[in-house]
Amino acid sequence: MIREAEARDRDALEALYRLLMPDDDRIQVVEERIEQIRRDANNFIFVSERENRVLGTALLHLCLDPMYGWRPFAVIENVIVDPQAQAGGVGRELLVHIEERCREAQCTEILIMSSLHRTEAHRFFEKLGFRQVAKGFKKYIP
């Protein structure tokens, strides 16, 4: 089942994010932030839950864009599936759900941000129809 994350998912989200970024000691998931995102009409934390266990998550931003009238574009970040649940359809289910949400919002495009070293994830994204089309840049602010 795919649903929006709730404050009660704090520990599960933090554990997944630590798998995603194992060397980042700044990770701190706050219940109030989860609830703030839930109230925001343009931002979503989705989780995949099976048997009362959160197995994956992704963060979706609907970015307001003046270029195409009222149509936003979407950015997906923080995509992670518990390694024990990979190849079980969790990631596919999560991203298909997000794509449906983006279609409902009439997004012009969906961008996925992913670290260069996550080549297995990149192959997974390509299987779902995403194509590498640009070189992105990030600057982390401590």
Image (cartoon, rainbow, N blue to C red):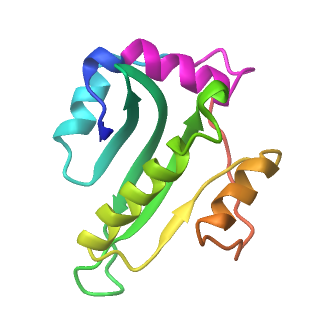
Q: Main secondary structure of the magenta part?
A: helix
Counting from the top left corner in percent of width and height, residue 15 is at 54, 16
Question: In this image, 74 relative to 138: left or right?
Answer: left
Find the magenta span and give its range: 10-27
Magenta span contains residue 19: yes
Of residues 85 and 134, the one drawn nearer to the viewer in this rendering: 85
| Relative side of 65 to 26, left or right | left
Front residue of 140/121: it is 121
Q: Specify whether 122 is left or right of 6.
A: right
Q: Eyeballing the image, is 78 above or below 85?
A: below
| Quadrant of the frame with the C terminus | top right
Instruction: Name the foreground residue: 89 vs 32.
Output: 89
Quarter of the picture containing the N terminus is top left
User: In this rendering, is residue 135 above or below 119?
Assistant: below
Residue 64: image location, x then y, percent: 31, 68
Residue at position x 66%, y 24% in the image? 19
Residue at 20% across, 45% down: 40
> Is-magenta flag for residue 97?
no
Q: Quadrant of residue 137?
A: bottom right
